[in-house]
Image: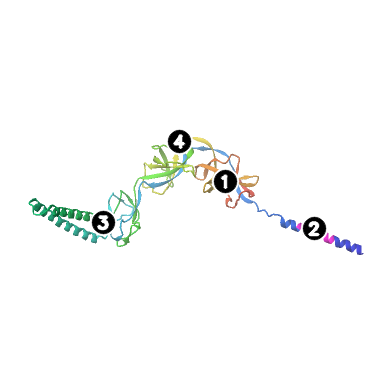
Amino acid sequence: MRLFSFICFISFILLQACSNSKGTEATNKPKTDPPVSVEAIIVKNRELVSPLELSGTLQAQDIVEIRSEVAGKLAYLYLPEGGFVAQGAVIGKLYNDDLQAQLKKAQVQLELARKNEERLKKLLEVGGVNQQDYDQAQTQIKTLEAEAEFIQAQIRKTLITTPFAGKLGLKQVSVGSYVSPNQVITTLQSPQLLVDFNVPEQYLAKIQVGNMVEMLVEGSSVKYQARIIATEQQVNISTRNLKVRARIENADKNLMSGMFARVLLGGNEKQNAILIPTAAVIPETRGKKVVVIRRGKAEFVNIETGLRKENEVQVLSGLQAGDTIAITGLLFVKPNSSLQIRKLRE
């Protein structure tokens, strides 16, 4: 009986030890994050047909913010919002009665000084005065002339004029308000429009000053013509693009500064290219990356992009046909994290 009890006691201790050992192993076992569910596509070579479609922005050839040169009360304002004005048109004037009074005073003093100079000149001819007195009279005339010119320049600063012919924007002030050089009264832009766009470096051979390009804007099927007038002096080292500027030849009232444009460059050339959805590209400060799925793991790969279409972008390097890349759930993906493909798009 005692032997049986002893055997049961030893068995209980062994079972308890095994149970504790398994519990410790379970506790020490590292936890693994569940796989991230993503949608993916298989990269393929596709036929890309020129013309190249590049993103551009319209802007006025000349545009300024009209401000007053000096601070003061606005006494006059003629500002036809949205209307065209000639170069040098006076659209506003500050209170300048005090300056006008100073100018009249200087002009009266100048008139007296000139009469005095004429009288001394006659006396000098007959020896009635010495040369020094006559020279002082001439100096006084020059001093008063300079003073009058200075006051006139101050008066001109109270006039608000247009530096070139163009279209006015909305007025920001009213008659009677106090304005300063820091305050914008309105804007003025020339009727001539330009389009700025970026060209990937591999297509720079297509860019020559004087060449024509076609341009489309949102909401219109009209193709506008633009002539290349200038380029930046160097390629952007971050994007590997060259900024190009073209003057729109047949601009009309439907075009406005700030509009988005699609610039068509080149002819109907065909080439094989890798195109991926723009949603798959992760922009970074010094480049762009995509998430490539290899053996169920995420691998971040640097890529170089080229032509950008509406929903796709051309990949110049970093990917090969047959690679599988993630296109959704990218915010939750980390390097080497497990991925589960819930849908493989075509």
Q: Which label sits in the foreground, 3 or 4?
A: 3
Instruction: Give percent across and percent down for residue 51.
Output: 47, 38
**What residue would you read off at disc 1?**
290
Horizontal relation, residue 227 to residue 334: left or right: left
Q: Which label sits in the foreground, 2 or 3?
A: 3
Q: Which mark is residue 154?
A: 3
Closer to the chain start, of discs 1 and 3, is: 3
In the depicted structure, whether residue 161 falls above or below residue 41: below
**What residue would you read off at disc 2?**
18
In 3D space, how far apart are the residues under numbered discs 2 and 3 (Cα atoms)?
100 Å
Q: In front here: 346 or 54?
A: 54
Closer to the chain start, of discs 1 and 4, is: 4
For image coordinates 8% across by 50% down, the residue present is: 125
Instruction: Give percent across and percent down for residue 205.
Output: 45, 36
Q: Determine the secondary structure under disc 1.
A: strand
Q: Determine the secondary structure under disc 4.
A: helix
Q: Amino acid at mark 3?
A: Gln
Q: Determine the secondary structure under disc 3.
A: helix
Q: Are marks 3 and 4 in contact (CB under 8 Å)?
A: no
Q: Quadrant of residue 159?
A: bottom left
Closer to the chain start, of discs 1 and 2, is: 2
Range shown magenta: 11-22
206 drawn magenta:
no
Q: Which mark is residue 205?
A: 4
Instruction: Give percent across and percent down for residue 244.
Output: 42, 42
What is the chief secondary structure element of the magenta stretch?
helix
Q: Amino acid at mark 4?
A: Ala
Closer to the chain start, of discs 3 and 4, is: 3
In 3D space, how far apart are the residues under numbered discs 1 and 2 (Cα atoms)?
48 Å
In 3D space, how far apart are the residues under numbered discs 4 and 2 (Cα atoms)?
76 Å
